[in-house]
Image: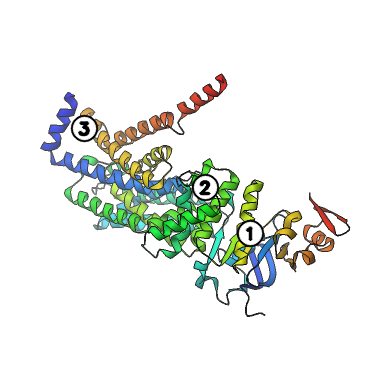
Amino acid sequence: MSTDAVVEVRNLSVSYHAHRALNCVSFSVTPGQLVGIIGPNGAGKSTLVKAIVGLINVDQGEINIWQQPVAKVRKRIAYVPQRNDIDLDFPVRVQDIVMMGRFPYLGLFGRPNSKDRTIVANCLQQVGMYEFRNRQIRELSGGQQQRVFLARALAQEADLFFLDEPFSGIDLNSESIIINILKKLRDQNKTTFIVFHDLAKAIGYFDSLILLNKKLVAFGSGKTVLNAKRLSEAYQGSIAILSSTNELMMVNA
Amino acid sequence: MENISFFYESLFKYQYLQNAMFAGIFVGIICGMVGCFIILKGMALMGDAISHAVLPGVVVAYMVGFSFFIGAVIAGVFTALGIGYIAQNSKIKDDAAIGIIFTAAFALGIVLITLRRGTGVDLWHILFGNVLAVSRYDLWTTFGIGIIVLACIFLFYKQLLLSTFDATMAQAIGIPTKLIHYLLMLLLSLVTVSALKTVGIILVVAMLVTPGAIAYLLTDRFPVMLGLSALFGVFSSIVGVYFSYVYDVATGASIVLVASVLFATAFLLSPKQGVFIRWFRAYLSKKI
């Protein structure tokens, strides 16, 4: 048990009704990392994130963030939900969404002031969406929407980020903008967890990988996690692995 | 023109018509604003449920002799709690839980009324409203409710906005989303009661949903939607009371029909999403 861990999970189990979604998951992550959460559909990837952020009830287990329960450090944690969980027809403009990242700082009845507006403009510029600040979100492409939600997380000035499937169905340009921002955050010693699908890119993007299939199959650097034995254990035949010399090639089935 | 000046004169002459008018205006504002949250949360059915379920509360209050505002609010909040409890503690989904609870409450109310027939509780007036019987006391109560509702929306604007738009993030940053949900249910009950006399229980949901839906078709900004919705609520009330007085038809239904016509107009002609503009665009793109 390390004392400098950002996120420490011990013996975490989660159920939906009678169905076990996660069983006895334990790991601990040190600051300044990009952590990928991978695994097949229904492996409990989103569930793990929701449990860490304290959005769902857990059966058992202990979760500490900076050696504290999550309820005490919420302000420093930014969570970006899956894009399909959000009503894209909602009457809000891009800048209104990013302003929501400032809400934790505004107190019970507070209103945004000029400092908050400057931060919002700044974050929109970082993700390259400032020109779109007055648009409604439905008018944007999937990648642009995802960048807006990243800008909202940036506006929260958090130290720990959780992104649920940020790259699904988005363009390559947006993906590279997002991953570059996340790498910059890592260089500022901030930590990001990302639920991720594309195994082929996983090694290049992440410092650590969590391979899940209802339980923790493997945890560690990309090279130790992504080997044929572990992947076939996690994906149980729903994946074809073609290994040639040092390169791994994977085909999702 | 003759009708309008006749209505205008009557408005100055008759106290009851003034009361009806003011009650309609207040109700239009607060129903319109609360309705925006209801439709964006996809809870129109919940609005319908709460409005029906206040019936037993109103009847018991009449029987025992305390203010029917209190009875209705208690019944409304209990209904919301009951629906939430069933949906969270069984595999029954929200819409079924709503159907079960509100019909149960409504049926209980009707049984209570028919048990005590002739005690001065007029089912017809509760169900369909009787705007011309709005007393000064009712008017002040409606005004008070309006102030409470507007104050809540103003004070908790960002909490309401975020938990309506993105409940997951709201929860993640520590906004008590369940409490906010029940606050909204409380506001819904309050609004329903205030609309009891003007449009009646059955048609309240129209005042909640229709003006908000019109505003939703016309704008992409939430604060503008709130304002427009209140405006359409007020407009429907005024024009509805006017038609009701001039042509001697039921007031609540008349108000609701005005709102419905406004909706149909917006649906067809809305500059961004209207049916006509879409036809027109399709026609243009075919020509090119």
* Residue named by callout 3: B245
Numbered disc in front, either 3 or 2: 2
Residue A87 - label: 2
Mark 1 burial class by Cα count in 10 Å: few <14, some 14-19, many 20+: many
Residue A84 - label: none
Looking at the rendered structure, the kind of residue marked 3 is: Tyr
Q: Chain of mark 2?
A: A
Looking at the rendered structure, the kind of residue marked 2 is: Asp
| CB within 8 Å, label 1 to label 2 | no
Looking at the rendered structure, the kind of residue marked 1 is: Ser
Q: Looking at the rendering, in which quadrant would you find the N terminus of chain B?
A: top left
Label 3 to label 2, Cα distance in Å?
A: 42 Å
At numbered mark 2, what does the secondary structure look like: helix, strand or loop?
Answer: loop
Residue at 70 percent of width and 59 percent of height: A205
Residue A46 - label: 1
Left or right position of A233 against B191: right
At numbered mark 3, what does the secondary structure look like: helix, strand or loop?
Answer: helix
